[in-house]
Image (spheres, coloured by chain):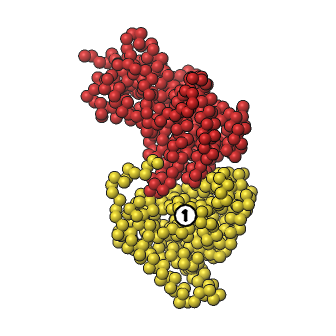
Chain colours: A red, B yellow
Amino acid sequence: MPEMTYAQALNQALREEMLRDPSVFVMGEDVAVWGERGGVFGVTRGLVDEFGPRRVRDTPISEGGIVGLAVGAALTGMRPVVELMYVDFITLAMEPLVNQAAKLRYMFGGQAKVPLVVRSNVGASGGKAAQHSQSLESWFAHVPGLKVALPGSPADAMGMLKVAIRDDNPVIFLEHKLLYFQKGEVPDGEHLVPFGRAVVRRRGPHITVVAMQVMMQRALEVADRMAVEGIELDVIDPRTLAPLDIETVYESVRRTGRLLVCHEAPERGGWAADVAAMVTQVCFDHLDAPPARVCGANVPIPYSTPLEDAVLPGAAEIERAARELIEGVRV
Amino acid sequence: MLRRMQLIRAFDSMLPDLYTRQLIRGSSHAAIGQEAVAVGACAALAGDDYITSTHRGHGHTIAKGGDVKRMMAELLGRQDGYCRGKGGSMHIADFSIGMLGANGIVGGGFGLAGGAALSAQLRGSGQVALCFFGDGASNQGAFHEVSNLSAIWKLPLILLCENNQFAMSARVEQMVSVRDLTRRADAYGFPGISVDGMDVMAVHDAVTTARLRAREDDGPTLIVATCYRFVGHFSGDTQHYRTRDEIQRWLERDPISSHRRRLVDSGVLTEDAADELEHEARRAVEAALQFAIASPWPAAEEAWEDLYA
């Protein structure tokens, strides 16, 4: 299996899908010539040289316009892949995404399809502060008609982006800034990762931990440390929030009796609450402790290092919560 | 064109009665007085050209060749409606004739039409997209973003502003920074054409010119059709924002009467044939209503269908 970075895996997925299907095209700000010819994070690198400026389109700074056009193009036979440089900028495109892309098929009684991918990135990294660090995935999971994907490894980045592009529905595809330059093995040949199928990253009988992307990696670090003491975590990466493979979580909680859900996004109104609520309703009799959450603070992401560290959840918070879940049980 | 204008008038004239009889619910907006814009524009388009519509969309759908039976069934929320009862008045679409939907969001059509134009350009299909919108929507950011994008990419797009003088109760001269809306095209470097929206032939000619320009890869055109909504924004509108005198002055320029007069005076139609067109429209709408009433209600389970492809 070849090893490549997450950004390279995304780049290869784009290249393969553009070769496979002439209706696929890419547009966004600085996707064609910036840096080493393509993208602030290099995801679209070299594509303009291979496919030309008609299919790899640099756009003006006009997120609402770009996404609006992409919805219209998707309605009429194309498969646009839009890159928004940071997910924070998606706020400028909420109208076409939420009112149009998510609803057109439904409100037109199934006449339309909207095979649209909007790629962007979530997460704090290196002091980008309040308007370049958000994790907005819960917003989109709340909108019926959208799919929401958050790949956590190079292999998933490739397999999930290819599936997103082939999907006939609008997909909000959220990469994580800290993962772009991490390397990992990617399977040879055609690699497709279907949506709505969680992956168990580590097996363990004591605590179910649900986390994606960087939080999933932190959970795995904690799992390594705690395993030494004989506490084994069951780390589940849902990979897509919509559709959500909640069955895999139920199955795990029925074995472990304890649930910990982690995300970088602020705790209030986040998807962790939804997972905890579903598990509480369905697996109540199996729970040995109340479900716990480790999430971002309910503040914007601040700039200064000690401030950013203070509001972002990390391995230490996951470990503390895991210990409380174990120690909280007084049988 | 007279036939289609009559059909729009007859269709939208039914709305108050449908509300009174509690056959329809929600919001629907009549285009009475604005028929010439919809019909003149769509008559200048090819069958596979695209249009996007507004919340006031019945006229656009009929003008593009929509089926009034399926439209009426949609208004009544029935299974045979265009959207199988999921859309209602503000979301009627017919993709088979390039009608990409009415839209409940003012300005929601700019991106869809611009994207359809981009799609046509990428596919090399020769199709053109026409976006109907109102004077009110010209203040939305989407108008400006799509104007710029379609200009730099020379998209085959026609932006057709129906300036009916009001955004609900807000008069255009109070809400729009320029007296002459066509000046907004200057900002983006494409032509802005002013046209009498009460004259179906004038609208037709302007859209024909814009369509030729679009197909020659010269990019978008803004057409501002000055017209007037004869009735309220929706049923129950108190219309405190205008006077009876003003309405009366515009009624004297009724686009249907004037086009009829033109056809009769030039010998294209006899008075009897023109009367018959009007009767035919009323009969078609009455038949559409009977069709809609006979159509079954959707089953509750259908609320969970059509969300994902």
Which part of the image, by quadrant, shows the C terminus of chain A? top left
Q: Nearer the viewer, residue B135 or A155?
A: A155
Q: Is residue A307 visible?
A: no
At horizontal 63% and vertical 64% (from top left) the residue drawn is B160
Q: Nearer the viewer, residue A12 or A281?
A: A12
> What percent of the width, then of the height, locates residue A321?
40, 20
Residue A133 against residue A118 in the figure, above or below: above
> What percent of the width, then of the height, locates residue A287?
29, 26
**Mark 1 belongs to which subunit?**
B
Snapshot quadrant of residue A303? top right
Mark count: 1
Q: Is residue B222 visible?
A: yes
- Amino acid at pointer 1: Ile
Residue A212 against residue A225 in the figure, above or below: below
Name the outermost residue toward the top: A228
> What percent of the width, then of the height, locates residue B121?
67, 54
> What percent of the width, then of the height, locates residue A100?
52, 51
Which part of the image, by quadrant, shows the N terminus of chain A? top right
Query: Mark 1 sits on what residue?
Result: B97
At horizontal 45% and vertical 62% (from top left) the residue drawn is B82
Q: Is residue B164 left or right of residue B72?
A: right
Residue B251 against residue B57 in the figure, above or below: below
Q: Nearer the viewer, residue A9 or A321?
A: A9
Snapshot quadrant of residue B24? bottom left
At horizontal 57% and vertical 54% (from top left) the residue drawn is A76
Residue B83 against residue B198 in the figure, above or below: above
Q: Is residue B136 left or right of residue B17?
A: right
At horizontal 47% and vertical 72% (from top left) the residue drawn is B12
Badge 1 density bin: few <14, some 14–19, many ≥20, Cα 10 Å = some
Q: Secondary structure at mark 1?
A: helix
Q: Is residue A247 left or right of residue A39?
A: left
